[in-house]
Image: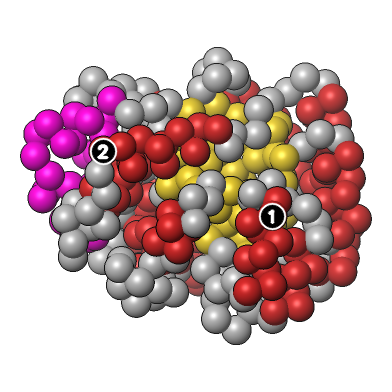
């Protein structure tokens, strides 16, 4: 069973002609905003869940009812084994505790990472890969089986199976991290980069209402001084404080994730510094941060000839693909934006030009 595209992306793809799809397939595209844990192909998750449960049952015969596993993890593993159909966003986000549990060792993390990389970079049945280049991002986790450094090294081992012009890693900081944890993640990213490993940037992600951004300034200064690219999830929801948005922009990011609700003061800074906007169409529509495709802020940035990169965000909850996101650019309204081939090619080149390496 392969990854199934559904919803907005599937409708857009279905409306295109064979020649239009071939044009999109042949277009060199960069995937610059893909989260590892949200992009694991579902069949791989199911297999890992089955193996996790089997191993746990072998060690603990009463694991099915054991209190050693939180209910959210037990329920998520069972749903994965049962072959859950992801029709609503909450169907997926409720699985995160289980996903973290079943990818908590270097071996399972390695398998998950390899599956994500192969989905994006290995030619599919069509003969074309989803992306010519991928910057995969992930937040380092410490587990009983590995340190945060080992987490990053495990992911890098898989990323570096592909040549530098195909794949690289962005280390993400979660807004809920305390100062010590965030500092550790940055130190790992910087030291690995200095050692020649393929860490190209750092990201800020997580609950847009969480965290004290004053505590993150020093971490992004250190990353920038080490030559790492900076991308920040920013202004994702309407009630993001305008002052916090300006504070994040003072970190001098190179790219911005979503940037859905920037005010005029923020837009002026973004335009002046030509910060590339990572656009995730299906994600924004399904999370209802934009009401319709026609009202999406991508139109504003296209109209201002501002650098953008079209990305998937998380292929599992959003049931999309990079090809599907590009189909949303091409399909005629209301299924898509109705852009011309020349306009779409220009956007693809913007994405490739905004890579960190």
Does the stretch in magenta take in 355? Answer: no
**Place of residue 70 in the rendered image (x, y in percent of width and height, measured from the top left):** 56, 68
Residue 356 pos. (x, y %): 65, 34
Seen at 69% across and 55% down, the residue is 272
User: Where is mark 2, residue-wise?
Assistant: 341
Using a 10 Å C-alpha cutoff, classify the residue at mark 2 as few (fewer than 14 neighbours), some (14 to 19) or many (20 or more).
Answer: some
Horizontal and vertical percent position of residue 312: 41, 49
Q: Is residue 17 above or below residue 92?
A: above
Task: Mark yes or no: residue 29 visible.
Answer: yes
Q: Which quadrant is the N terminus positioned in?
A: top left
Q: Is residue 303 above or below residue 199?
A: below
Please give the label number shown on residue 327.
none
Q: How is the image coloured?
A: secondary structure
Counting labels gives: 2
Residue at 43%, 58% (x, y): give it. 303
Q: Is residue 188 visible?
A: no
**223 sits to left or right of 287:** right
Residue that numbered label 1 is attached to: 272
Residue at image position (40%, 37%) is: 346
Q: Is 67 placed above or below 53 here?
A: below
Magenta stretch: give its range: 1-26
SS for callout 2:
helix
Q: Could you say whether the residue bearing mark 1 is in a helix, strand or loop?
A: helix
Counting residues from the start of the chain, the first of labels 1 and 2 encountered is 1
Residue found 86% across the figure and 59% down from its top: 217
Can residue 13 be found in the magenta stretch? Answer: yes
Q: Is residue 174 left or right of residue 307?
A: right
Task: Tell me the CA gap for discs 1 and 2.
Answer: 28 Å
């Amino acid at each position: 069973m392969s990854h199934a595209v559904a919803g907005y992306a599937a409708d857009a793809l279905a409306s295109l002609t064979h020649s239009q799809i071939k044009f999109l397939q042949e277009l060199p595209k960069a995937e610059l905003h893909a989260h590892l844990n949200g992009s694991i192909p579902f069949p791989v998750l199911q297999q890992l869940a089955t193996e996790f449960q089997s191993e746990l049952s072998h060690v603990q015969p009463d694991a099915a009812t054991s209190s050693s596993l939180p209910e959210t993890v037990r329920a998520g593993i069972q749903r994965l084994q049962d072959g859950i159909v992801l029709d609503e966003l909450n169907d997926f986000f409720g699985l995160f505790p289980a996903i973290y549990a079943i990818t908590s060792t270097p071996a399972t993390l390695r398998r998950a990472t390899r599956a994500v990389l192969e989905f994006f970079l290995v030619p599919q049945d069509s003969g074309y890969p989803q992306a010519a280049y991928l910057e995969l991002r992930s937040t380092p986790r410490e587990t009983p089986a590995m340190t945060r450094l080992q987490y990053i090294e495990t992911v890098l081992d898989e990323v570096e199976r592909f040549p530098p012009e195909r794949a690289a890693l962005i280390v993400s900081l979660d807004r809920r991290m305390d100062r010590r944890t965030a500092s550790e993640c940055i130190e790992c990213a910087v030291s690995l980069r200095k050692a020649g490993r393929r860490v190209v940037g750092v990201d800020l992600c997580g609950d847009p209402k969480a965290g004290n951004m004053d505590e993150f300034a020093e971490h992004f200064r250190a990353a920038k001084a080490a030559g790492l690219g900076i991308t920040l999830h920013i202004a994702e929801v309407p009630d993001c404080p305008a002052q916090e948005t300006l504070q994040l922009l003072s970190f001098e990011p190179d790219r911005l994730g979503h940037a859905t609700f920037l005010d005029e003061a923020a837009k002026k800074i973004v335009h002046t510094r030509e910060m590339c906007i990572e656009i995730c169409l299906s994600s924004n529509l399904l999370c209802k941060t934009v009401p319709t495709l026609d009202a999406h802020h991508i139109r504003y940035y296209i109209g201002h000839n501002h650098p953008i990169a079209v990305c998937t965000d998380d292929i599992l909850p959003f049931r999309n693909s990079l090809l599907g996101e590009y189909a949303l650019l091409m399909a005629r309204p209301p299924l898509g934006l109705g852009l011309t081939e020349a306009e779409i090619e220009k956007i693809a080149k913007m994405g490739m030009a905004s890579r960190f390496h």
